[in-house]
Each structure stands twice: as structure tokens, then as C-alpha cells.
Image (spheres, rainbow, N blue to C red):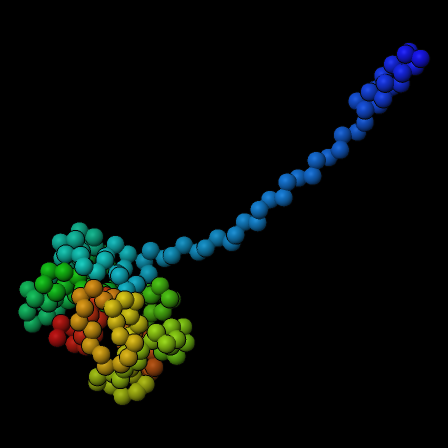
Amino acid sequence: MIRLVTAAASLMLLAACNAPETAESPAAEAPVPPATPAADPNALTAEGFGPLRIGMTRAEVEAALGPDSDPASVGGAEPETCDQWRPERAPDGLLVMIQDGVLTRISVAAPSTLKTDRGFGVGDPSVAIKAAYGARAVSEPHKYSPAPAEDIFVWASGGPATPHAYVQDAAARGVRYEIDSTGKVGIVHVGGPAIQMVEGCS
């Protein structure tokens, strides 16, 4: 009897050893979220462009993109107080405004192809800008040209939500789309309260 039990156990053990291996079900992998597109480091934002940041000193601007590409051209009546110029290594169409030795505004005009972080630049229609920003886009009549020319302000911080309210807070940051007589962007200004200035340094 003991021999029969032992033999049966041996046969069962042998059968188990020769049984085909069952494939292990692969562990369920966690879904990989879609990659977020990297922000364009050269996009114009309320804080600056590329290596330039609003609030830099003139020396820091020159270290980043070079000195004035045309020192003979004066961008303001009192350049020691306010000057506007293009650094040597800046993209075409880009001007910086330096007030009391500090970068307060960056402006781009034709032939610039630079875009804001929302994808707008010279030549884009005002209707697309207003649609993209919604209530954040505050429109004001252009000082010199009739409609459809206008100024569209989008304040990232420190700005008003209503037209005709002049911002004086030096910490405020925003974008101004200057719309020309064709209803398209002629100039983009980014920076502090200086974006409200309509005649360069005046």
C-alpha cells in the first residue's frame, strides 16, 4: 500500500514537472501622458525675449545681445534718461528701450518674424488676438489712426481690466499689440508700463 501511494505521488510530481509553462500575463503598463510641447525660448512674453528680461541693466542687455548696432542714431531726446535701440546680435526688427539704465520694453516690427507666447506677431489680425485672449484683451483707440487701428493690451500682472487706465506700477508686466489701419499687428511691445508709450521715449 505504501508502495502504491509512493508511486502515485512520484507520477504526479513527474507530470507537474513536464506540464507546459503557462505564460505570465504582462503587467499592465501605466498610460504615458502625451508630451507637453516645450515653450519656445525665443517667444516674446510680458517678461522679455530670449536672454533679455525686463529689469536688466543696460550692461546686462549688452552682454546678452551686444551694444547698440547704430550708436549714431539716438532713440530719445534725452538718451541718458530714455533711449531706444537695436542690439548688434538682436533679430531684425527688434528694439530695446532703456529707461534710467534699465530695460523696460522690447518692441518688434517688420521685418521681424518673432511671435508672442500665444503665437501672434507682425501681420496677424486683431480679431484672432481678441478671440484668443477673450476678456483679458483690453482695446483702446489708436492715438493717431482711425479704426480699425487700435491698441490691444493684455496685462499679465499689475494692469487694469478696463481701457484708459494708465498703469504706473513698475512691477506690472504686459503685452501691447499695436494694430495698424489694415486691422493687423504692426508692432508688438512687451514689458512694463513703458509699453503704453506711443512715441518711443515720449
Query: Residue 51, position in %: x, y?
Result: 25, 54
Q: Residue furthest top?
A: 3
Numbered marks: total: 0
Q: For the point 9% across and 63% down, which residue is it?
A: 100
Q: Residue at x 38, y 57 (%)?
A: 39
- On the question of residue 93 being in view, the answer is no
The residue lying toward the viewer, choosing from 197 and 144, is 197
Give the residue at x 21% y 55%. 65
Viewer-proximal residue among 179 and 93: 179
Given the current orientation, which residue lies at the most extreme front position? Answer: 1
Q: Quadrant of the N terminus?
A: top right
Instruction: Write down the quadrant of residue 198 in the picture.
Output: bottom left
Task: Look at the image and tell me in which quarter the C terminus lies.
Answer: bottom left
Horizontal and vertical percent for residue 87? 18, 59
Q: Is residue 11 left or right of residue 76?
A: right
Rendered location of residue 40, percent (x, y): 36, 57
Q: Quadrant of residue 50?
A: bottom left
Q: Residue 169 or 153: which is nearer the viewer? A: 169
Q: Residue furthest bottom?
A: 146
Q: Which quarter of the picture shows residue 121?
A: bottom left
Residue at the location (85% across, 18% down)?
9
Please provide percent x and percent y for residue 74.
10, 68
- Can the viewer see residue 29 in this picture? yes
Q: Is residue 142 above or below residue 49?
A: below
> As drawn, is 28 to the left or to the right of 143?
right
